[in-house]
Image: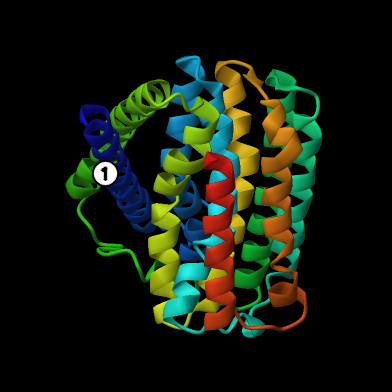
């Protein structure tokens, strides 16, 4: 039982440290006068994905690249099927009122680029540079749109609704408290990543399960908990744009940034099973969003049940 307890402890530390990092980074940016809208598009997105990033880097350096790749592919599948599915069961999400078409197209293009690079057999440093270049283009476009929006008369506090789920988002927070949050995040993230990866690998060896399967299931679902919490709160507050945008943005960051940065620490070979099954499930799950993004459909309770059941079926197929 000890590896399970230590893996769970590592996951809890990751979640708490990620939350501390987001709080510190957001409040530092607000103290320095960085617009809230830009904070929500950049620092919050990075902070909530920091656990996945640290997990992938640790997995590569520990020669368990299957966990790194499984974490990203599994998280993206979980983000769409369970992170959108469960909140929709709790509250009807009026996604018909959202305009996420451009971001969604970016996500689909990122998914296709990622799959194409996977078919080369290994994510090398060159593959990582391609992914990071694509991320830079996406961030540049988002920054340009945000600045144009503000230039056209947007309110100074517009974009703070994205931060509603974050306690203590205070532009007057003392620098010493901001420093404590940042220190807790920067110390806790590598500690939690180390505990989770090492003990997940032990679990995999004990039960004869591959690192890839552990990454696709236990690690992927665990590191998707911040996105799930954010989406649940957004759905309950009837902020469907935040819920859908959170998932789309997180998936893009996972594909482009996490594997892109992880390749700086070593090559990531692609298990043939990814090419046969998991990558196509990820892409298929992404395509399930078409009715909600382009055809004005809401994610109602029935859709939530269907998406959640698809995730249960997928995990069952991976474990069998």
Report the front residue among 14 and 102: 14
Is residue 300 shown to the viewer in this render? Answer: no
Quadrant of the image occupied by residue 146? bottom right
Is residue 198 rendered to the left or right of residue 268? left
Mark 1 neighbour class, 10 Å CA radius: few under 14, some 14 to 19, many 20 or more? some
Q: Secondary structure at mark 1?
A: helix
Point out residue 155 in the picture as x, y percentages from the top left corner.
51, 78
Please state if 178 lies on the left or on the right of 129 as rendered: left
Residue 207, percent from left and from top: 40, 26
305 is higher (above) or lower (below) than 66: below
Residue under the image location 41 percent in, 70 percent down: 232
Give above or below for 9 relative to 308: above
Q: What colouring method underlies this structural image?
A: rainbow
Residue 276 visible in image: yes
Across and down, in percent, residue 42 comes to 52, 52
Q: Splitting the image into 4 quarters, where does residue 176 fall?
A: top left
Instruction: Determine the residue positioned at 51% across, 26% down.
Output: 210
Q: Residue tagged by mark 1?
A: 12
- Please name whichever residue, 320 or 148, is drawn nearer the observer in this view of the structure: 320
Q: Residue lying at the far front in this picture: please name it.
A: 320
- Left or right: residue 24 versus residue 309 is left
Residue at x 55% of width, y 30% of height: 212
Name above or below for residue 213 compared with residue 98. Answer: above
| Residue at (34% x, 45% y) in the render | 18
Residue closest to the eye, 23 or 171? 23
């Amino acid at each position: 039982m000890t590896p399970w307890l230590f893996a769970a402890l590592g996951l809890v530390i990751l979640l708490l440290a990620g939350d501390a990092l987001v709080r510190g980074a957001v409040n530092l940016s607000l103290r320095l006068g960085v617009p809230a809208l830009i904070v929500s598009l950049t620092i919050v997105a990075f902070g909530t994905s920091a656990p996945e990033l640290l997990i992938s880097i640790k997995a590569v350096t520990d020669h368990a690249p299957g966990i790194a790749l499984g974490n990203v592919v599994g998280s993206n599948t979980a983000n769409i099927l369970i992170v959108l599915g469960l909140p929709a069961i709790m509250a009807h999400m009026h996604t018909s009122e959202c305009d996420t078409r451009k971001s969604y197209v970016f996500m689909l293009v990122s998914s296709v680029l990622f799959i194409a690079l996977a078919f080369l057999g290994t994510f090398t440093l060159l593959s990582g540079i391609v992914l990071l270049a694509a991320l830079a283009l996406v961030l540049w476009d988002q920054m340009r749109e945000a600045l144009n929006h503000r230039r056209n008369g947007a309110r100074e506090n517009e974009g703070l609704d994205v931060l509603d789920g974050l306690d203590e988002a205070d532009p007057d927070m003392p620098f010493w408290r901001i420093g404590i949050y940042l220190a807790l995040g920067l110390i806790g993230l590598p500690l939690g990543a180390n505990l989770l990866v090492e003990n997940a690998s032990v679990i995999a060896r004990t039960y004869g399960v591959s690192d890839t399967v552990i990454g696709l299931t236990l690690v992927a679902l665990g590191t998707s908990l911040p996105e799930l919490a954010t989406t649940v709160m957004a759905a309950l507050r009837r902020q469907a744009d935040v819920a859908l945008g959170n998932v789309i943005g997180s998936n893009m960051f996972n594909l482009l940034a996490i594997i892109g940065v992880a390749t700086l620490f070593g090559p990531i070979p692609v298990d043939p099973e990814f090419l046969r099954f998991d990558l196509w499930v990820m892409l298929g799950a992404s395509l399930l969003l078409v009715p909600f993004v382009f055809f004005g459909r809401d994610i109602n309770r029935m859709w939530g049940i269907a998406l959640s059941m698809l995730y249960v079926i997928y995990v069952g197929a991976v474990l069998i």
